[in-house]
Image (cartoon, rainbow, N blue to C red):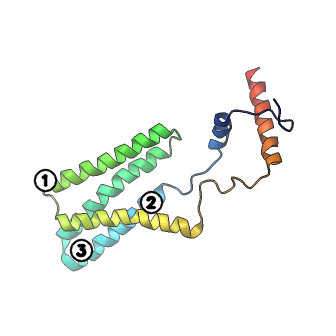
Amino acid sequence: MQLNGVEPISILRAAKRFQMKTQPAQNPWILVRKQSLLTVAGCILVGVGWGIDPATSVVVGGLCVALPSAYFAWASERTLVGSRILSQGVVKVVSTGVLMASFLGFGAVLAPWFLLGMLAGQAAYVWTLAEASWTDVTAETHVGRESYAETAAKTALVVEKQRDEQD
């Protein structure tokens, strides 16, 4: 069956075609930079006011958040497969918990300052989300801005190309 001279294609095939053309809303490393910036700022403030031991605990707390985020940013740049992204998110959460438990469990840090460092790292998420809402950054800013005829014309070319490749 043809619709307006264009043969329909599977929605999954159309999504796969479109998937590689979209850009992420933001570079994932922006979050890691913000986490590092907030952690260093917290370290400097605490170091000046309370000394080196609390400042070290702030840095370690920030690293417990920033290191798993850095892994997730690195890994998420290399795949668009949903199940892999989900598993990388689970690895991120588990590794954050393991780092927290190991530093707090061995008593290597001062707990209140450590938690302040973690709070600084987590504040980067709020900062990033707020910044994105101020600038209207979206993953697919161009979706829905073309007419049905334009979409159909592009789809017809893709279907034609796929048929040629299959033959």
Q: On the image, numbered disc 2 is attached to which residue?
A: 31
Q: Which of the two residues, 4 or 79, is positioned nearer the viewer here?
A: 4
Q: Residue at x 43, y 66 (%)?
A: 126
Q: Is residue 20 visible?
A: no
Q: In front of the other: label 3 or label 2?
A: 2
Residue neighbourhood size for the residue with mark 2, other residues' Cα within 10 Å, grouped as few (<14), some (14–19), many (≥20): many
Side of 72 relative to 98 (left or right): right
Mark 1, Cα crowd under 10 Å, few <14 / some 14-19 / many 20+, is few
Say which quadrant the N terminus sits in. top right
Quadrant into which the C terminus falls: top right
Q: Residues within 10 Å of mark 3 (few under 14, many from 20)?
A: some
- Rendered image quadrant of residue 25: bottom right
Mark 3: amino acid:
Gly
Judge left or right: residue 23 versus residue 146: left
Determine the residue positioned at 22% across, 79% down: 49
The residue lying toward the viewer, choosing from 72 and 163, is 163
Q: Are marks 2 and 1 in contact (CB under 8 Å)?
A: no
Task: List the residue tagged with mark 1.
Answer: 106
The mark closer to the camera, 1 or 3, is: 1
